[in-house]
Image: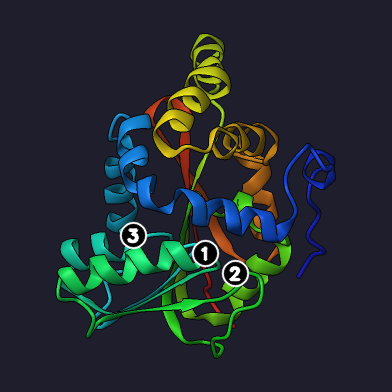
Amino acid sequence: MEQIVMPNNQEKSRDIPKRDNVFRMFDRIAKRYDLLNRLLSFRQDVKWRKKLTQLLPNKENLSVLDLATGTGDILLSIADARNNFAEGVGLDMSGEMLKFAVSKTDTAKLSDKIRYIRSDAAYLPIEGNSFDAVTISFGIRNVVDVPQSLLEMYRVLSENGKVLILEFSLPKNRLVRVGYLFYFRYILPFIGGIISGDSYAYSYLNKTVETFPYGEQFCKIMEQAGFSDVQEHRLTFGIATIYEATILTK
């Protein structure tokens, strides 16, 4: 396995809050998080999550670990869309987000299939070779130690397991990119701040998106972590990407 090398712009401070402050930020916006996701993405986030569920393994009694699970949208979407889904564990460091995840899971009567753990995505309290798939949506850029988190995903996946990472990216088309960045830098923080009461949380979003590696660069990082057959699925003009990879042998 190669040494995992993050690009220099990921190592810089880039005016991003310290680890504990990030978790507290998500605690503050938890109440309005789902509403803002739908509103600010024009409901594209629903389509992106649906695409992710379609890429999961076609395996009986499918087990899924969802990192940075937030309010549980991914696991609830999987349970709704996949008949082969048997078990899901959602992990997040924000206690307030997990409260909403538990409430939504109880309402959906899925508590027998889905449970939640408050823990760090870089240090998983999970035994090795435990899951058929690991997912993370819009969370990998918030992880303090990305290489360590990828290694942990590799460790907990069973042989022939699959990792699916849904994350924002930058469009290749120059005109689309200009419009996208204008929206992210100015409109999104304004609207997000009004509704959530925390404008910094949504200015933080564009800072991390603009500096986090994407496309071929992130595929290379996944390969360095040991994943095979790494593919990228660009969504909605490239403003988001699903990275898909497998473990062939361990």
Q: CA distance from mark 3 to mark 2?
A: 16 Å
From the image, state whether disc 1 or disc 2 is nearer to you.
1
Q: Residue 32, located in which quarter of the rendered image?
A: top left
- Element type where label 3 sits in the image: helix
The type of residue carrying mark 1 is Ser
- Which residue is at the front of the view, 201 or 206? 201
- Toward the viewer: 30 or 137? 30
Callout 1: 10 Å neighbours few (<14), some, many (20+)?
Answer: many
Residue 9 location (% of width, % of height): 80, 38
User: Element at badge 1?
Assistant: loop
N-terminal label among 1 and 2:
1
Give the residue at mark 3: 74
Relative depth, front residue between 167 and 61: 167
Which quadrant holds residue 124? bottom right
Q: Which residue is mark 1?
A: 94
In this view of the protein, can residue 71 be seen by the observer? yes
Query: Quadrant location of residue 13?
Result: top right
Q: Which residue is mark 2?
A: 121
Residue occupying the far front of the picture: 197
